Amino acid sequence: MNVKLYSEDLSLLQQWQKKITIYASEILEDIENLYLYNNMIVILDYSCCHKNLFHIMNLSESQNIKILLLDNTPTFEKGKKVLGLGVHGYGNILMNELFLNSAIETIKNNMIWIYPEFTTSLIQGFSKEQTAPNEIAQLLTSRELDITLLIKDGLSNNEISQHLDISINTVKSHIKNIYEKLNVKNRLSLSLLFKTK
């Protein structure tokens, strides 16, 4: 998978190139040249392309180009807007190497990547008054159910640990079991079980 990078900030482009370890990356000189390429991931600096994003998305759609948009100050509202335009990933412009490579891999596998705080905001947007559907409650132990409800309410592992007075490792172990029992892969998928029931 080829990865192209576009920003007007040369030092930012160099940082991205150092962090990308799973694929070769090249700098895209002119965003208007997107039509020359196909079947790739393009990482864009939000600050230099947000005004032309609709045009960029039209260029990329016909060429099977997936866009990872990185923003200096990512927000939930901007995230909803750009994901609605068809961006395949949205996150912080200075994300660490692990997140950047994870984002590329996620997008390569035809999934959407969003920064963790966006996911938390999305989960917290679901009603906190909902109770566990019977099908979920029957599959889990009482402790797993407690943790599931706290995840649904948007609590982090640290917050769950403090709230239930258990170790982080115990929380992680319970979450692994919960995901397996409910056949979900992440917090968002888990929360969606409550929304659709």
Image (cartoon, grey):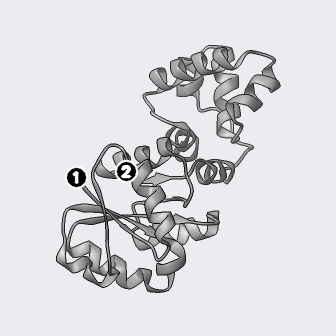
At 45% from the left and 32% from the top, the residue drawn is 184
Judged left or right of residue 185, residue 142 is right
The residue that disc 2 covers is 104
Amino acid carrying label 1: it is Met
170 or 193, nearer to the observer:
170
At 63% from the left and 19% from the top, the residue drawn is 144
Residue 69 shows in the view:
no
Q: Position of residue 165 (x, y in %)?
A: 81, 17
Tell me the quarter of the image containing the C terminus: top right
68 or 137, nearer to the observer:
68
Judged left or right of residue 145, residue 138 is left
Name the mark on residue 179: none
At 46% from the left and 49% from the top, the residue drawn is 100
Q: Does 88 sit above or below residue 61?
A: above
The residue that disc 1 covers is 1
67 or 94, nearer to the observer:
94
Q: Does 97 sit above or below residue 147?
A: below
Label 2 residue SS? helix
- Residue 52's image quarter? bottom left
Q: Are marks 1 and 2 in contact (CB under 8 Å)?
A: yes
Q: Position of residue 7 (x, y in %)?
A: 45, 73
Q: Position of residue 136 (x, y in %)?
A: 55, 26
The alpha-carbon separation of the residues under discs 1 and 2 comes to 10 Å
Label 1 residue SS? loop
Amino acid carrying label 2: it is Ile
Q: Does 108 sit above or below residue 34?
A: above
